[in-house]
Image: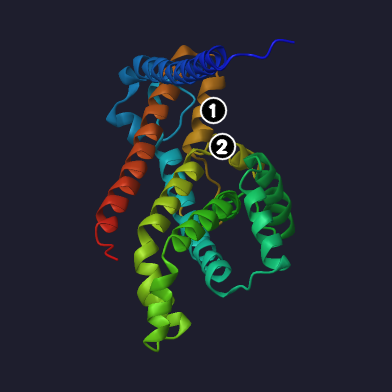
Amino acid sequence: MTPQTPEPLARRRRLMARAFELACLGATLLSVVLLFVLLGTVLYQGLGSLTWDLLTRLPSRLPERAGIKAAALGSLWLIGLTTLISVPVGVGAAIYLEEYARDGRLRRLIQLNIANLAGVPSIVYGILGLGLFVRALALDRSVISGALTLSLVILPVVILTAQEALRSVPVSIRHASYALGATRWQTIWHQVLPVSIPGILTGVILAVSRALGEAAPLVAVGAVAYVSFVPSGLRDAYTALPIQIFDWSQRPQREFHDLAAAAIIVLLAVLLCLNGIAVYLRQRYGKRVRW
């Protein structure tokens, strides 16, 4: 067998590297093109139906009278409650795991389970919410059941992002605080948390954005597609924008498809606003960090 000379081998490696680069570029361009085609289709179909009446009318069986007021306010109820439930629990768990828990088997086991839970499909959380909140705790198909279920969906993400933000604070900051006589709580409250807040807020907003677009767990816990009133309490029935979009897209009338596209535009606008807030907070509070 004739040994391969270095020059052909190097040329083949360069060709493989170039081919890999082109393949990655093709995948990127394909993703961008598909995204623009999807957005263009939605905008073309939905802009004509995007009116003020769409935002202020309640659902109706007649497309010319239908609106998303109940779904939009139902989504606000869900997101508000989900944030109130998941943020204190998630950030508290992250602080305990990063600052108080000793490195051992139990901590590593908890950490592994949290990481695995972040990848579980949301419909699984919906089935869990149906069994735990709707049936076992008898909360029925209410706003609080939906919010608790969405909290389960985003809780692992909130914990992991908060842990990453806390981990990014140099250990020397903690040691310097301890050297000055501060307690662990004082170090966390006055030194670690102010520095890690931009990362925590970014993770929380992105997790809440995910919850806003979730439909599968809400279907599982009984979110109603047709609600002709705005929820006024935790035990009221509700609907949400993803549920309303899904319901309209299943109907045979073309007018409902246009309304569904308009509702998608509203949902995308809200998601873009939340992502923009996350970027703004990171930029604004990140500039205050001076080591």
Who is closer to the viewer here, 131 or 278?
Answer: 278
Instruction: Judge whether 49 appears above or below 216 on screen.
Output: above
Q: Which amino acid type is marked by label 2?
A: Ala
Is residue 68 visible from the viewing direction of this image?
yes
Q: Residue at x 48, y 48 (%)?
A: 207
Nearer the observer, disc 2 or disc 1?
Answer: 2
| Residue 224 placement: quadrant | top right
- Asked if labels 1 and 2 touch by Cβ distance under 8 angstroms, the answer is yes
Q: Residue at x 46, y 12 (%)?
A: 254
Q: Position of residue 237 (x, y in %)?
A: 56, 47
Q: Secondary structure at mark 1?
A: helix
Q: Residue at x 63, y 51 (%)?
A: 115
Who is closer to the viewer here, 7 or 256?
Answer: 7
Q: Residue furthest bottom?
A: 181
Q: Disc 2 designates what residue?
A: 215
Task: Name the quadrant of the N terminus.
Answer: top right
Q: Which amino acid type is marked by label 1?
A: Phe
Q: Position of residue 53 (x, y in %)?
A: 31, 30
| Residue 9 placement: quadrant | top right
Q: What crowding class fits label 2: few (fewer than 14 Cα within 10 Å), some (14-19), or many (20 or more)? A: many
Q: Position of residue 144 (x, y in %)?
A: 56, 55
Q: Disc 1 designates what residue?
A: 246
Task: Name the quadrant of the C terminus.
Answer: bottom left
